[in-house]
Image: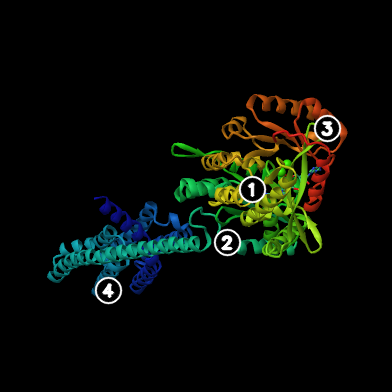
Amino acid sequence: MTKNIEHSKLYQSEGVRLLYNNSLPGILITFVASSALAFTFIDDTNFNDKFAWWLVMSLILIMRVIDTRMWLKSNAEFKTRKTWLLRFGCGCLLSAAMWSLYAVIFYPQFSIEELSTTNVILAAMAGGATSILSGNLLLASFYNILILMPMSILLLMQPEQYKINLGGLGICFTAIMIVSSVRSSKYIKEAILLRYRNKKLVSRMEETIRVRTREVYEISNKDSLTGLYNRSAFLLAAQNVELEFKEQKISGFSIFFIDLDGFKNINDTLGHNVGDRVLVALSDRLKKFIDSGNLICRWGGDEFILLLKEHCPVLISELADKIIESLSRPIRLDEQNVTLNATIGISVCPEHESSITRLIQLADIAMYSQKGKYPERLAFYNMGLERDLHRKITLNEALKGALERNEFRLMYQPIVDATGQVVSFEALMRWRYQEKEISPVEFIPLMEQSGRIVQTGHWVLEEACKTLAQMNKHNAGICMCVNISLIQFYDKGFVNNVNRLIERYAIPGHLLHLEVTESIFQSDQMMINQKVSQLQQRGVKFSVDDFGTGYSSLSVIQNMNIDYIKIDRSFIQNIELKGLSIVQAMMNISRSLNFSVIAEGVETDKQRQLLEECGIPFMQGYYFSRPLERQNALVYLDQALESPPVVNGL
Ligand code: C2E
Ligand code: CA
Ligand code: CA
């Protein structure tokens, strides 16, 4: 039903178009025919009347020409309105009425020639109308009736038989014309419908092509998970920005290298599905930072790059802080909250570079240098960072064969008790590379990152145990402190290796002290507790190194049965200012939780005195001795033997 209504509306509106498109030839034929008819049979008796008729007919035709022009000039969307049909219909029927008027008015004066000419013209006009007016069946039919019927009826009423026959013929002709109008309008309807369907098909095809093109664009330019630009599309768009800068259309821009902190953990513990949802949620947050001309892409894994058309450091920092704040807000996933953070490295054009690929590299360097240095999570590139990175890469390479090349050695720094007697040594690693001593502060983290610390750490333990065995020949009861990295705990053979060394060098277990940093309390507690207690069963003691700089929880220290804490040297250096109260507090806690305290980094007699007043039982630092080469440490110990040793049970 609705389809029928839709089709008849379509036929009506397309019909108007057809009528007007055929209008001018129809008008021209009418004009030619009316002029010919009026002036061929004109004479003095009917001149005025025929001329008047011709004038009125011509005026009507002029009006119709004007109307057609107006239609042609009207807006496409208004061309099919119903009022046009009314206007056209009026003009057309008026012309038909004029034809009939001619026949009826001038009939009494018709000669046989004029009668037949008029009949032929009317029949021809009616015949033409079936095709010219096929856009509207009703109009075509009325036109035919109006043009043929009056004359036919008039003829029927005449006494002469041939006129009656002619009248009958006229009526039959009208009927035939109407039937033929019906048929031609049917064809027109079908043609209109076909055209409409074709048009619809074409527009549907165009839409499908549009959708497919968009899909192809998205597949080749967008990251399928997050919907952000992918690497290659970003580089292409970014190169255009680089060009804009070179053509001085913009004064500069900046690259943010954004790396998520803790994403690997989420993937490993909650699964890749959750990982993907986290990436989508965070990408949606990043999308909010895209505005005029800025670009953002997923560079890979959990890395994103933002290109900002701004190079003012203040504005850049503000935006970077906002991004960090936005990314560190909890993400709600089903029943749980997941919280991540992000580190951002920034490079700026033209300050640092102007090539996109180089700027990305520099921003990456800045990000990498800042990674892990919380709470600050934002870094601008500077030349120093690149030098640091190069040095790291060079040292990393050099560390590969350092153990085999015997480039490592240990130094030993004494630890003394309250009376100044040496009770222990701390083994400290040294690396001589290209005639220079490299600080362990620099190379230990590199070995931790590469995992090389496991093998080297074992070597340190063995060296320290050898020295300890030797020292104990001279001075029984001297202890050895060895620094252990968290990574070494994750090594499956760690406990066995320590046990084997204790046995091989026949060392009483309690003389070996292992120093661990507070980071140990943030790791796999079960595993660490187990290994610590296995070694403690062999008598090995544990110290928490650099105490107070990390995240120690006193309850964890108690659970783990830690034997010593080493107060970090920063508190000792500060002892004459605020440090004293902190040292006192640590001392009090140690008494109630039953562990002992070592103060490290004692450099002056004043510091020693204050620590003594606090009741600190053990001290280490340059004031007593710098770290000593193995031989010197043995000599140091021998000299200490000369004064009677005080055994402190360290
Ligand atoms: P640490 O365990 O805190 O070692 C003490 C550091 O403080 C040593 O630096 C020592 O030379 C220095 N020191 C001692 N007394 C004083 C003092 O009075 N004033 C000052 N300013 N410093 C003092 P070093 O030898 O450069 O070692 C640095 C760090 O490297 C160590 O800090 C330790 O964390 C790490 N390390 C050294 N050897 C090893 C090792 O064999 N294994 C592991 N895992 N780490 C090691
Ligand atoms: Ca230490
Ligand atoms: Ca320390």
**If the image is split into quadrants, where does the C terminus sit?**
top right
Q: What label sits on residue 485 in the rendered view?
A: 1
Mark 3 vs 4, N-terminal side: 4
Residue 519 coordinates in the image, percent (x, y)? 63, 41
Find out whether the residues at labels 1 and 4 contact each other: C-beta distance under 8 Å.
no
Mark 3 vs 1, N-terminal side: 1
Residue 517 coordinates in the image, percent (x, y)? 66, 41
Q: How many marks?
A: 4
Frontmost of labels 3 and 1 is: 3
**In screen coordinates, is 151 left or right of 61?**
left
> Is residue 545 visible to the viewer in this orientation of the structure?
yes
Label 1 to label 2: alpha-carbon separation: 38 Å
Frontmost of labels 2 and 4 is: 2
Q: Which residue is mark 3?
A: 608
Frontmost of labels 1 and 4 is: 1
**In screen coordinates, is 441 left or right of 193?**
right
The foreground one among 338 and 88 is: 338
Could you classify mark 4 by the number of other residues whose Cα lies within 10 Å: few (under 14), some (14-19), or many (20 or more)? some
Secondary structure category for the residue under label 3: helix
Residue 103 coordinates in the image, percent (x, y)? 27, 64
Three-letter amino acid code at the position of disc 4: Thr
Could you classify mark 3 by the number of other residues whose Cα lies within 10 Å: few (under 14), some (14-19), or many (20 or more)? many
Could you classify mark 2 by the number of other residues whose Cα lies within 10 Å: few (under 14), some (14-19), or many (20 or more)? some
Label 1 to label 4: alpha-carbon separation: 120 Å
The foreground one among 315 and 184 is: 315
Mark 2 vs 4, N-terminal side: 4
Residue at point 51%, 57% (across, down) = 223
Secondary structure category for the residue under label 2: helix
Q: What label sits on residue 231 in the rendered view?
A: 2
Q: What label sits on residue 117 in the rendered view?
A: 4
Residue 49 coordinates in the image, percent (x, y)? 36, 63
